[in-house]
Amino acid sequence: MTITPKPITEDTNRMSDRSPLGTRYTDGTETYTLVAYSIDPLSPQYARPAFVADNDLTNPSTHWYDHLANGTLPLLYPEDICGEDETLTVAAEDSETSTKARTAAVKQYQARPYRDTGEFSRVMAFGELTTDEELAAFIEFAKTEVELRQVQWKLEHVSRERSETIARICDLKGSQQAAAQTLGVNQSTVSRALRERPELP
């Protein structure tokens, strides 16, 4: 399959609409690098382009509403940049900035925890999928990745509830040793549950 740079609008989201990763874009004011595609394995015909703004690359976001940690690099989608009748056009190449943006985006994605079920369906492709075989393999990976995230989230949720219950029993029994004996667990398990207990507001 041939992938060539092309203009992007708010509605550009089909797999066949893809431009090469690293392509530079402008809205007439700011400049962006195309760094990834967001792909939902349940709708493999779609691929949402994700960008990093040059300004954010230089000055990472510290907005309170950014659900990533302060100082991180937001990934922007067309609807974050374009209005209904606006178009992102291909800008002049800048290989150094493109490489920097793509590297930073991958690094942040790898370190980012999955905080809620809304992120389960989003799997990002940070490299080119240039053949039908590569695309099919990535979709299969995305399906298993989503399944794994769901299991991990469930495990973390149940583990957190278990720790909270152990901590409550420790309070009722009055000591870690008594709680451990009652539950038939090591005292270190009770200690860890107390350390993991959420702080009261």
Image: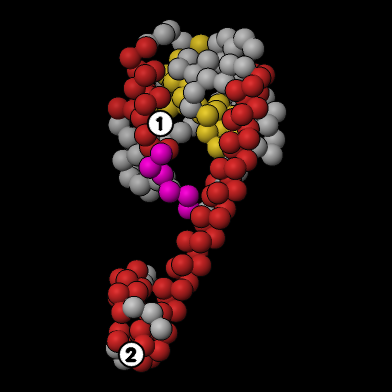
User: Which SS type dominates the magenta stretch?
Assistant: loop
CA neighbours of label 1 inside 10 A, class few (<14), some (14 to 19), many (20+): many
Placement of the C terminus among the 4 image quadrants:
bottom left
Quick one: 119 or 24, which is closer to the camera?
Answer: 119
Placement of the N terminus among the 4 image quadrants:
top right
The residue stretch that appears in magenta: 110-115
Q: Amino acid at mark 2?
A: Ala
Residue that badge 2 annotates: 178
Q: Residue at x 61, y 29 (%)?
A: 137
Residue 13, quarter of the rendered image: top right
Numbered label attached to residue 138: none
In the rendered image, the vertical position of residue 188 relative to residue 95, given as above or below: below
Q: Amino acid at mark 1?
A: Ala
* Distance in Å between CA atoms under marks 2 and 1: 49 Å
Q: Is residue 114 magenta?
A: yes
Quick one: 172 or 32, which is closer to the camera?
Answer: 172
> Could you tell me residue 46's position as x and y percent?
66, 29
CA neighbours of label 2 inside 10 A, class few (<14), some (14 to 19), many (20+): some
In the rendered image, the vertical position of residue 173 relative to residue 18, given as above or below: below
Residues marked 2 and 1 touching at CB (< 8 Å): no
| SS for dot 1 | helix
Judge from the rendering whether residue 71 lies leftward or rightward of residue 138; answer left or right.
left
Q: Earlier in the sequence, mark 2 or mark 1?
A: 1
In the rendered image, the vertical position of residue 201 relative to residue 175, given as above or below: above
> Could you tell me residue 146's position as x and y percent?
58, 45
In the rendered image, the vertical position of residue 165 relative to residue 73, given as above or below: below
Q: Is residue 178 magenta?
A: no
> Could you tell me residue 192's position as x and y percent?
32, 71
Residue that badge 1 annotates: 105
